[in-house]
């Protein structure tokens, strides 16, 4: 998610950034010490650069210190329109999401563990490390939501700021003491349990940092994938059983967009139907598509 810079309130957490303790400062006043990812797309700079300040290295404030899935960037643009008055046409928004999701996206290894969120699959999230992180990050939405992005430590702290400014229950949740040590307070300040917000911040800064070996290895390799041709596919529909079939993919010249025609046959009844649609491949691997025709049950987005 991209955050509204004006939506900040005093934080209850402290942090050490680059060796300098900034415990008494709001994260908005922290000095960003991590290297940003420059924004090179002209339309993105035009639409986002009026509020997100550019620097000499080509970074845009906030944006250059976040990586996210297509859904994350799309959500950010919608929030900018609703809360910050961003004026952007649908096709322009689509182009900005394409750019940011590819050049400021996730590596395959980073995206794999959270794809169930984009695919709208129900999954028991067993990867939440402790109750404090659960309360801070997964009491209102899936844990995959924050784990679908990578941020600098300052940006993770600003994300907490945004939640407190927009959602009244967030500050109450963040200020709770560590559930693992609830009741351990002996009256001495240095013995009080850490707040949920600080525990979550430290975890996210380490588990989902902006710069990772996976992204460093993948980013130079980003290309439009060679998907043209015929592919064997399988599917399952709730209440209708399993299907097998074939998808014919045709790339659109000079873009990361594709057209697709899919024919599926039911293994239970033998009935077949065909759907036609279009798709994009973000970040050189992450497929998003829509289709129409045939079974209405397949009209939802596929990934």
Image (cartoon, rainbow, N blue to C red):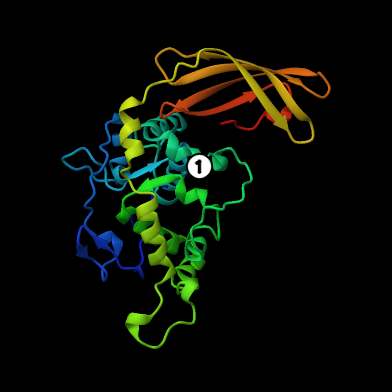
Bin the neighbour count of mark 1 within 10 Å (Cα to Cα): few under 14, some 14-19, many 20 and up: few
Q: Furthest-right residue in view?
A: 269
Q: Is residue 239 visible?
A: yes
Q: Residue at x 58, y 17 (%)?
A: 260
**The C terminus, quarter of image:** top right
Pick the residue in front: 112 or 68. Answer: 112
Residue found 57% across the figure and 51% down from its top: 125
Residue 11 image point, x, y percent: 35, 68
Position of residue 143 in the picture relative to residue 153 (left or right): right
Instruction: Work out whether 241 lies above or below 66.
Output: above
Between 93 and 97, the residue placed more toward the observer is 97
Tell me the SS state at disc 1: loop
Residue 4 in view: no
Taking the view exactly as shown, the residue that stands out farthest to the left is: 56
Q: Tally the marks.
A: 1
Residue at image point 45% right, 82% down = 184
**Residue 35 figure quarter:** top left
Residue drawn at point x = 24 percent, y = 66 percent: 22
In the visual, does 30 lie left or right of 110? left
Q: Position of residue 267 (x, y in %)?
A: 78, 22
Q: Provide the residue designation for mark 1.
A: 113
Residue 59, position in %: x, y?
24, 41
The relative height of residue 255 versus residue 105 in the rendered view (above or below) is above
Say left or right for 180 vs 19.
right
Residue 294 is situated, as x and y percent measured from the top left of the image, at 73, 21
Q: Is residue 186 left or right of residue 240?
A: left
């Amino acid at each position: 998610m991209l955050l509204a810079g004006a939506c900040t309130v005093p934080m209850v957490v402290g942090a050490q950034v680059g060796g300098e303790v900034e415990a008494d400062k709001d994260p908005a006043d922290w000095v960003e010490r991590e290297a940003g990812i420059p924004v090179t797309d002209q339309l993105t700079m035009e639409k986002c650069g009026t509020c997100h300040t550019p620097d000499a290295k080509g970074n845009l404030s906030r944006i250059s210190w976040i990586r996210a899935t297509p859904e994350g960037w799309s959500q950010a643009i919608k929030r900018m329109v609703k809360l910050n008055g961003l004026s952007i046409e649908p096709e322009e928004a689509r182009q900005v999401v394409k750019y940011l999701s590819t050049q400021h996206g996730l590596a395959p290894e980073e995206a794999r563990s959270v794809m169930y969120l984009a695919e709208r699959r129900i999954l028991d999230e067993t990867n939440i490390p402790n109750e404090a992180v659960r309360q801070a990050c997964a009491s209102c939405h899936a844990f995959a939501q924050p784990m679908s992005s990578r941020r600098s430590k300052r940006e993770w702290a600003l994300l907490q700021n945004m939640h407190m400014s927009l959602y009244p229950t967030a500050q109450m949740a963040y200020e709770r003491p560590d559930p693992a040590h609830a009741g351990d307070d002996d009256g001495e300040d240095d013995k009080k349990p850490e707040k949920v917000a600080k525990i979550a911040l430290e975890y996210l800064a380490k588990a989902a940092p902006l710069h990772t070996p996976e992204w460093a290895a993948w980013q130079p390799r980003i290309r439009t994938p060679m998907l043209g041709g015929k592919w064997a596919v399988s599917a399952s529909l709730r209440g209708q059983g399993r299907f097998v079939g074939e998808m014919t993919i045709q790339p659109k010249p000079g873009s990361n967009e594709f057209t697709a025609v899919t024919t599926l046959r039911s293994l239970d009844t033998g009935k077949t139907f065909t759907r036609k649609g279009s798709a994009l491949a973000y970040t050189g691997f992450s497929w998003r598509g829509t289709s129409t025709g045939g079974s209405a049950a397949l009209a939802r987005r596929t990934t």
